[in-house]
Image (spheres, helix red, strand yellow):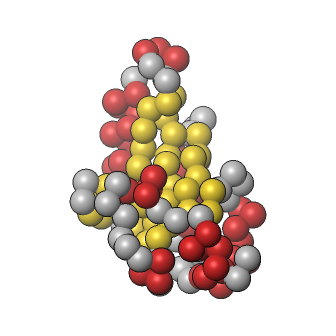
Amino acid sequence: MVSESRAAVVKLLKARGAKARRGHLRIAVGDLFWYVDPRADGVGRNAYLVLEVGCWTPAAAPEPDGGAVDCPLLVDVPLEDLIADTTRLLDLITSIGDLATLGARLDELPGALVDQSLRDLLGA
């Protein structure tokens, strides 16, 4: 089930503009790059799908090699309703394309981990 769910989510991500980069899906929005990696959380029948979301800007070099997990902003988004939750996330991240907007809307990404280099850029 997780592999079928993952395929459906990846199809939606690609339809909404995600492109493969170094083995990870990435969406360019203005000055920011959003990495969105679907992954299973758990094993077997109890596993569910999570979107591991990272945000990177060239101002916070270097470019992440490991996808979302290497980004200066990282947040996990559990998917209860695969399509609705993925669509909602995509609507959010594709409306944030610069550091000022990211700083103002950071609370819309609950649980986001933001490293010091990005905090400095955000003025947080």
Q: Nearer the viewer, residue 56 or 84?
A: 56
Which quarter of the figure is the N terminus placed in? top left
Residue at position x 64%, y 79% from top?
120
Say whether residue 16 is visible: no
**Where in the figure is residue 88, as x and y percent of width and height?**
60, 56
Residue at position x 71%, y 62% from top?
108
Q: Nearer the viewer, residue 12 or 20?
A: 20
Residue extending farthest to the top is: 45
**Where in the figure is residue 89, as x and y percent of width and height?**
57, 57
Asked if residue 41 is positioned above or below residue 52 in the image, the reply reads: above
Residue at position x 58%, y 73% from top?
118
Which quarter of the figure is the C terminus placed in? bottom right
Residue 102 falls left or right of residue 47 = right
**Where in the figure is residue 67, as x and y percent of width and height?**
37, 56
Q: Nearer the viewer, residue 65 or 12?
A: 65
Residue 35 falls left or right of residue 88 = left
Q: How many marks?
A: 0
Say whether residue 1 is visible: yes
**Where in the figure is residue 34, as x and y percent of width and height?**
46, 66
Residue at position x 55%, y 56% from top?
74
Asked if residue 86 is positioned above or below residue 107 in the image, the reply reads: above
Quadrant housing residue 121: bottom right
Q: Nearer the viewer, residue 105 or 64?
A: 64
